[in-house]
Image (cartoon, helix red, strand yellow):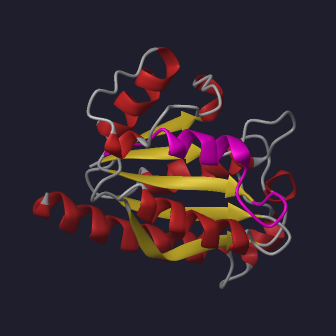
Amino acid sequence: MKIGIIVGATREGRGTDRAAKWVARAAEKLEGADVEVLDLRDYELPFFDEAISPQYNPERKPEGAVKAWLDKLAEKDGFVVVTPEYNRSLPAVLKNALDYVAYELEKKPVALVAHGSTGGAQAVHTLRAVTAGALGVSVPRATYIPTMAGMAFDEEGNLNEDLAANPYGPNGALQATLADFQWYATALKDAR
């Protein structure tokens, strides 16, 4: 199972990359997992400005960073999106990257891990709608980290002691989210 861990923030000083390391380590423990972190910093995507929606453009011929991004998504069996919450929603850079998607997420599971003052709940809510629009399948469980990732994780992606010690905290939530993700990934891959 080829899993893409999408780092949904690119700003200087972000903590989302730390959270993505934590998620990637946990995902690597799933049976048959081949995990790759997909950092949006590695794809210099311009603002989406195509004349029509990618799903309705049979003549579309993406190039450069857009083609590289879409090709990378196409090769994966599912995704875990790790995102902060900005102004009660997802970061613009993440929405922009998903606006380029035509059929690359179709019938593939998308699990959500968010962080922020409300655990990223509103970013997750918005991402569920965006995922459906991109024809992906949003995994029902999500992981909510109730603080900024820079405060929750060290540089290597280790969860701080207080959060790690909470039996009902992020570690348990991530395990449940990934268990659901694996179930959906297997079921959907078999059905595709």
Whether residue 113 appears in magenta in the rendering, the answer is no
> Of all residues shown, which one is farthest toward the bottom?
168
Whether residue 95 is visible, yes or no, is yes
Q: Please state the extent of the stretch shown in magenta in the rendering.
A: 85-103
Residue 61 is left or right of residue 18, and the answer is left
Q: For the image shown, how many numbered marks are present on the structure?
A: 0
- The percent position of residue 140, horizontal first and vertical second, equals 45, 78
Whether residue 93 appears in magenta in the rendering, the answer is yes
Determine whether 66 is above or below 109 in the image: above
At horizontal 77% and vertical 71% (from top left) the residue drawn is: 163
Residue 7 is left or right of residue 30, and the answer is right
> Of all residues shown, which one is farthest toward the top?
64
Rendered image quadrant of residue 39: top right
- The percent position of residue 120, horizontal first and vertical second, equals 73, 68
Between 88 and 112, the one nearer to me in the picture = 88
- The percent position of residue 98, horizontal first and vertical second, equals 52, 45
Rendered image quadrant of residue 134: bottom left
- The percent position of residue 182, horizontal first and vertical second, equals 32, 65
